[in-house]
Image: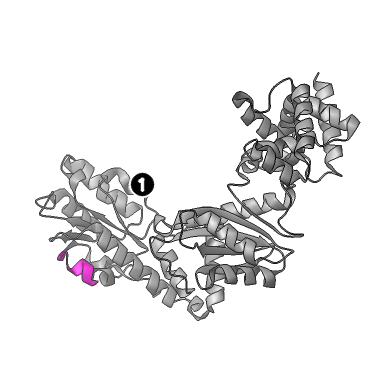
Amino acid sequence: MSALTLREILHLDVVGGADPELLAGEGGLDRPVRWVHSSEVYEGAGFLDGGELLLTNGFAFLDADGGALRRYVRELTARGAVGLAVEVGRALERMPSEVVAAARELGFPLIALRRVVPFVRIAEAANRAIVTHGLAARPAVTLRTADHSAALLADLADRQALNQPEVQARSALAGFRPGPGARLVGVSVHGPAVAARAAVDRVAGRGALCAAFPGDVLALVAAPAGRDAVRGVLDAFRAVAAPGLTVAVGPAVAAGDGWLRWSDTLRTARTTLELALTVPAAEPALAEGLLVTSSRALALERELTRGGVEANRERLTRLVGDVLGPLLEWEAVHGSDLVHTLEVHLRHGCSPTRTAALLHIGRQSLYQRLERIESLLGAEVGDPELLGELLQAACAARVVGAGRAGQGASERQILSDRTRAA
């Protein structure tokens, strides 16, 4: 049998410490237990999927009448629950006779726990045992460490139905054992798989889950110590990544926050990589053919394209035309680079020194461009009321230019749409 039975769960040391007494349902002790949950809401049977052992301290029983208690047991049975374990002697002085009678009538396992053991300890130990037993019974146990990594990363990235004990057990089989206080960062790398994996190994070594998939190498990296985990991972990749790679980094999450957060950072890294590959970068790459970016660096792009670039193209084109139309009209005639200048200037805190350096122009040339921009817009670039709208529109102009014959084509389309709207 590939799953632990209720009988085996009751023989675990931590459960034995609660002094369990079977009151009904002896014939159901050999049913497999899929999971152990705790709940104090007797109406909660509808949330079960089947195969659960439910733990409760009986608080909800105190105010329930006999009919409600009998319905509760019937609902647990109908939902496929394996059994009910009730803490007796503290909040609940005795097991309600209606619960015992209904369980005996249905052959439903009913267990009284006569000593207090925190349910979190029982659930954690039981579920860990369930996962470990299940993994040991599957052929997957013969897989190499790399195969375990790939399988777990795929499930996390696809947000398959998982649970934390299972993720921890599978992570350990893959050789990845982050402590509860570790900071984890999802990484998605596009480019030659050998170079991508080498970069992850140089950044994290054994402190990572890593596997190659069609289109990217995906990794969950234990970040180096420091206040800014994302910055630490970015700097590490910038130092070791080879030309030809595009590296996208997700947000930092605490290892102890649970598998859903692990999934979040991996999924965000992947969507960030997609944007990095399809939307022109706001700034030049660090080196030819190398881009290292993060979900927070592309936060505005991610919000503007939620649901996909094409799904938002009409809305973004309209936004660009409404806010930056005069600049685009000027660029169409004079071939200057005002929109890009504006975006770089806004992204860097309106610092003339940093903007000029990034654009590789002199400060005097920058001042001339900024004067032209303000003249055309009829507003100051540094106006706090306009900063957000201007940056959003400048970013949108770059986004809707993706996949076209060039930025000029994008600008002509925006101007055409703006003319029709007028």
Total tally of numbered discs in the picture: 1
The residue labelled by disc 1 is 46
Residue 200 in picture, x, y percent from top left: 60, 68
Quarter of the image with the C terminus in it: top right
Residue at 68% in and 70% down: 195
Q: Is residue 318 visible?
A: yes
Corner quadrant of residue 348? top right
Percent coordinates x, y for residue 272 in the rendering: 63, 51
On the image, the x and y values in percent for residue 350 come to 65, 35
User: Is 117 a magenta residue?
Assistant: no
Q: Nearer the viewer, residue 363 or 200?
A: 363
Closer to the camera, 22 or 405?
Answer: 405
* For residue 245, side relative to residue 104 (left or right): right
Q: Is residue 158 visible?
A: no
Circle 1: residue type: Gly
Residue most extreme to the right: 333
Tell me the colour scheme of the image: one colour
Q: Position of residue 136 (x, y in %)?
A: 42, 77
Q: Is residue 95 left or right of residue 239?
A: left
Would residue 324 appear left or right of 330 to someone viewing this image? left
Q: Is residue 19 magenta?
A: yes
Residue shown at 52% from the left, 73% from the top: 148
Q: Secondary structure at mark 1?
A: helix
Q: Which residues are magenta?
A: 11-20
Answer with the quarter of the image where residue 406 lies.
top right
Query: In the drawing, does residue 262 fall left or right of residue 196?
Result: left
